[in-house]
Amino acid sequence: ATPTALLVGTGRGAQLGILIKGPEVLESTRRIDTVVLDKTGTVTTGQMTLVDAIAVDGQDSDELVRLAGAVEAASEHPIARAIARAAADQHGTLPQVSDFGNLEGLGVRGTVDGHDMLVGRPRLLSEQGWQVPVDIERATAAAEAAGRTAIVVGWDGAARGVLAVADVVKPTSEEAIAKLRALGLTPVLLTGDNTTVARTVAAEVGIDQVIAEVLPADKVDVVKRLQAEGKVVAMVGDGVNDAAALAQADLGLAMGTGTDVAIEASDLTLVRGDLMAAVDAIRLSRRTLRTIK
Ligand code: ADP
Ligand code: MG
């Protein structure tokens, strides 16, 4: 490949809103056959909204939102921001949290109003040995069946309510995935979220392969496994939890709207955070390399 042609490709990339780390990056896109896509913030907007609060055992749902919001106010996660925002809208100022802890890919913990709190994915509380009433399991299943992410809220050793959080697919995701397929690439959805929600989103945008309930540290292993099967993998992501997988992939594409850690780990940045730019990037590299031949 002549450096001049690659540099021309790099300049064209900038015009398309694609920042390319170095001219040699375009070459590695040539043999890509699989595109792994993170769900939250990549295929979806990641701008979550709290849509329902279900309290059990005679608890008050407003109190549930207030206490959960106080813990989540200390977290940067999109789910946390949705819950904290709703709590602040309902209650104004929230109580202080102490002993805050972020449980990466699982949820958060902290002390609020003298209560020892856990807020996070449904399995988190039972795994910590907390009591989970059957009504919590029912409310979780109902929220997930509706395509929502269920977050369980508990304090002092028991689960006491479920918060349903909704996210929306980005307007261009479906078209971009159809175009990736037309280029002969297989899309795979990868997420830490639950399988039901992941399948709902996948169906909405036309993805058949779903790998869900993957812990942040295990995303990189999914990429390695696909590579061990002989796949040449592009990974598109936005979060801190995607960084290792982005670096491991044959081509890492970061959403420009995502975290700095993801951008640093990637070969390409899609400035506008729009998946159509991933299609443009792959097309551009193929065109550039054809010119060189
Ligand atoms: P994704 O792979 O979709 O970006 P994450 O790995 O960040 O998702 O999170 C996986 C799951 O962990 C979430 O769907 C949620 O159930 C739970 N979780 C993570 N962080 C939080 C938090 N701050 N509050 C509540 N739940 C959380
Ligand atoms: Mg994400």
Image (spheres, grey):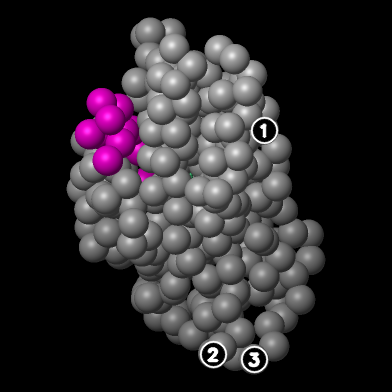
Circle 2 residues within 10 Å: few <14, some 14–19, many ≥20: few
Is residue 291 positioned above or below 158 on the image?
above
Q: Which of marks 3 and 1 is in front?
A: 1
Q: Do the residues labelled 2 and 1 touch (CB within 8 Å)?
A: no
Q: Residue 78 carries which label?
A: none
Is 61 displayed left or right of 1 in the figure?
left
Circle 3 residues within 10 Å: few <14, some 14–19, many ≥20: few
**Disc 1 Cβ-to-ligand 2 distance below 8 Å:** no
Q: What element carries label 2?
A: helix
**Disc 3 Cβ-to-ligand 1 distance below 8 Å:** no
For the point 27% across and 50% down, which residue is it?
175
- Kind of residue at disc 2: Gln
- The residue carrying mark 2 is 90
Q: Image quadrant of residue 242? A: top right
- The residue carrying mark 1 is 21
- Sequence-first disc among 2 and 1: 1
Q: Give the range drawn in magenta.
A: 179-194
- The residue carrying mark 3 is 92
- Kind of residue at disc 1: Lys
Circle 1 residues within 10 Å: few <14, some 14–19, many ≥20: some
- Kind of residue at disc 3: Gly
What percent of the width, then of the height, locates residue 38? Answer: 45, 42
CA–CA distance in space, label 2 to label 1: 45 Å
* Front one among 47 and 278: 278
What percent of the width, then of the height, locates residue 267? Answer: 61, 31
Q: Can residue 151 be seen in this view?
A: no
CA–CA distance in space, label 3 to label 2: 6 Å
For the point 67% across and 33% down, which residue is it?
21
Is residue 244 positioned above or below 271 on the image?
above
